[in-house]
């Protein structure tokens, strides 16, 4: 493989593991001499650019006794071969991409070998072999149907009549437990660690958003190379996620609270829609602040059903409340903190057990439970919400989604219609969490004081939302 050109040599000098990268490229040349190295400028999803090496060429694929050449390109990150290449189809003008198990609508290739990349066990030659085998089972390209094509076997015309899979990467026979965390800083880092400890994941992608004020931690993760963790600046690395945790914040120096929140809304505008396109079947879990507003914003911008956009909300307070009631006060009933994540939040307790349908129900507010809940709140008062505490709560919710646990969490969700709430607002409510998202528990009548707090939150949140440019 000729790596002596001035451009290639100049870019190779910037690679962290130059000698190992060159050795890997020589291996590719010995097995696939038609795959050639070149240079180019790769644009990440945050619009930043980097000059990188890439491999381009065709891979031979056999189908029904015929051979076809599929054009591909591999972008090699500057930490290659310790990080996997970004693999893309390179269709010619007369080809169309067939979205399927291993290829998304943009032509990005997703394979188990990429998700489980672990150099030196993993290699580009092994990846090409796997790619050929997968494409023979499910060809990713077909020919555009035009009057000029008269030979039914010309190029890839045969695949135009094949049944195309309804879904993309998220609909494999054995779904990959992939989680993405968007946003660096203390909560982002703590979320990565907590999810790794709590959940069984096949892949965890950590994207440090450049515009976010909560930066940091990605360099350390790259240095220490945790198993199953991919650190990326490219949002497309999140494709096929089952859960997407967003912790990014973009606090500005603006004086008014509305202006400060608007900076977060503007940040979301650049990332939420992209995340949805890349993982249309994911459950989105919001931890940015203010969480009820930002969950509402994310739902609006994503176009997803409200059951699949939730906020971390009052889940941490709810878990603490149940723990205090159980351990300190010997009350063995689940309880939840509901409402806005503010001084207006209120506590509710489950009824005497489970309903006839097997689901928990919120007990009606009564004079007998209120002193107990007030005492539990007093015990909890000085615990605060530190990064690790919030991250453990995020991991617990994530685990309920990945395992379809059907555990009831108090998460920020669309509250319209619950307990007589008519406005479109997001508040923390008890929801059963599973692989398809959230299902609210039925609303109940609250004590007058608690109901007043909830109504005040609805009014203030509605007013703030009306002042934001979504």
Image (cartoon, grey):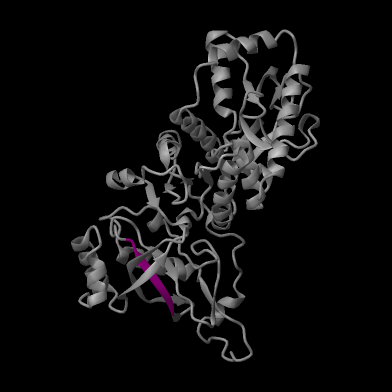
Q: Magenta includes 72?
A: yes
Q: Which residues are magenta?
A: 69-77
Q: Residue 205 at what x, y percent from top left?
A: 43, 48
**Residue 364 in the figure: left or right of residue 198:** right
**Residue 443 in the figure: left or right of residue 138:** right
Mark yes or no: residue 304 visible. no
**Residue 290 in the figure: left or right of residue 114:** right
Q: Outermost residue, left direction? A: 19
Question: In the rendered image, which quarter contains the N terminus?
Answer: bottom left
> What residue is at 56 percent from the left and 45 percent from the top?
264
> What residue is at 34 percent from the left and 54 percent from the top?
117
Q: Quadrant of residue 459?
A: top right
Q: Residue 251 at what x, y percent from top left?
A: 51, 42
- In this rendering, the answer to whether 452 lies above or below 200 is above
Q: Residue 125 at what x, y percent from top left?
A: 30, 66
Magenta region's main secondary structure?
A: strand
Q: How many marks?
A: 0
Mark yes or no: residue 404 visible. yes
Q: Is 259 in front, or is 278?
A: 259
Q: Is 64 in front, or is 400?
A: 400
Q: Residue 383 at what x, y percent from top left?
A: 49, 19
- In this rendering, the answer to whether 138 lies above or below 336 is below
């Amino acid at each position: 493989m000729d790596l002596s050109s001035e451009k290639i040599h100049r870019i190779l000098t910037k690679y962290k593991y130059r000698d190992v990268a060159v050795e890997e490229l020589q291996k590719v040349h010995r097995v696939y001499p038609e795959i050639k190295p070149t240079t180019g400028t790769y644009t990440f999803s945050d619009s930043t650019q980097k000059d990188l090496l890439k491999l381009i060429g065709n891979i031979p694929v056999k189908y029904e006794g015929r051979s076809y050449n599929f054009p591909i390109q591999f972008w090699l990150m500057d930490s290659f071969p310790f990080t996997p290449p970004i693999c893309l189809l390179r269709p010619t003008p007369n080809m169309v991409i067939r979205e399927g198990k291993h290829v998304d609508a943009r032509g990005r290739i997703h394979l188990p070998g990429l998700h489980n990349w672990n150099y030196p066990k993993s290699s580009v030659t092994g990846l090409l072999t796997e790619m050929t085998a997968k494409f023979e089972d499910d060809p990713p390209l077909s020919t555009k149907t035009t009057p000029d094509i008269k030979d039914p076997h010309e190029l890839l015309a045969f695949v135009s009549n094949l049944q195309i899979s309804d879904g993309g990467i998220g609909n494999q026979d054995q779904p990959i437990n992939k989680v993405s965390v968007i946003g660096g800083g203390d909560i982002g880092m703590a979320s990565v660690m907590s999810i790794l400890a709590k959940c069984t994941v096949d892949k965890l992608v950590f994207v440090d958003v450049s515009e976010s004020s909560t930066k940091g931690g990605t360099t350390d993760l790259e240095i220490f190379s945790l198993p199953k963790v991919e650190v990326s600046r490219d949002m497309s690395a999140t494709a096929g996620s089952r859960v997407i945790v967003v912790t990014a914040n973009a606090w500005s120096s603006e004086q008014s609270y509305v202006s400060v929140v608007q900076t977060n809304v503007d940040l979301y505008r650049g990332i939420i829609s992209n995340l949805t396109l890349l993982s249309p079947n994911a459950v989105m879990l919001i931890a940015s602040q203010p969480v009820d507003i930002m969950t509402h914003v994310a739902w609006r911008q994503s176009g997803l059903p409200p059951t699949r956009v939730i906020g971390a909300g009052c889940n941490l307070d709810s878990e603490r409340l149940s723990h205090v009631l159980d351990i300190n006060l010997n009350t063995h009933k689940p309880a939840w903190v509901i409402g806005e994540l503010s001084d207006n939040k209120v506590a509710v307790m489950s009824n005497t057990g489970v309903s006839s349908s097997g689901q928990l129900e919120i007990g009606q507010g009564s004079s007998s439970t209120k002193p107990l809940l007030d005492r539990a709140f007093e015990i909890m008062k000085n615990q605060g919400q530190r990064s690790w505490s919030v991250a453990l709560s995020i991991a617990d919710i994530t685990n309920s989604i990945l395992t379809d646990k059907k555990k009831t969490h108090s998460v920020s969700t669309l509250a319209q219609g619950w307990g007589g709430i008519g406005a479109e607002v997001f508040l923390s409510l008890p929801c059963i969490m599973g692989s398809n998202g959230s299902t609210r528990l039925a609303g109940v009548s609250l004590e007058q004081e608690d109901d007043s707090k909830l109504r005040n939150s609805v009014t203030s949140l509605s007013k703030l939302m009306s002042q934001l440019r979504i």
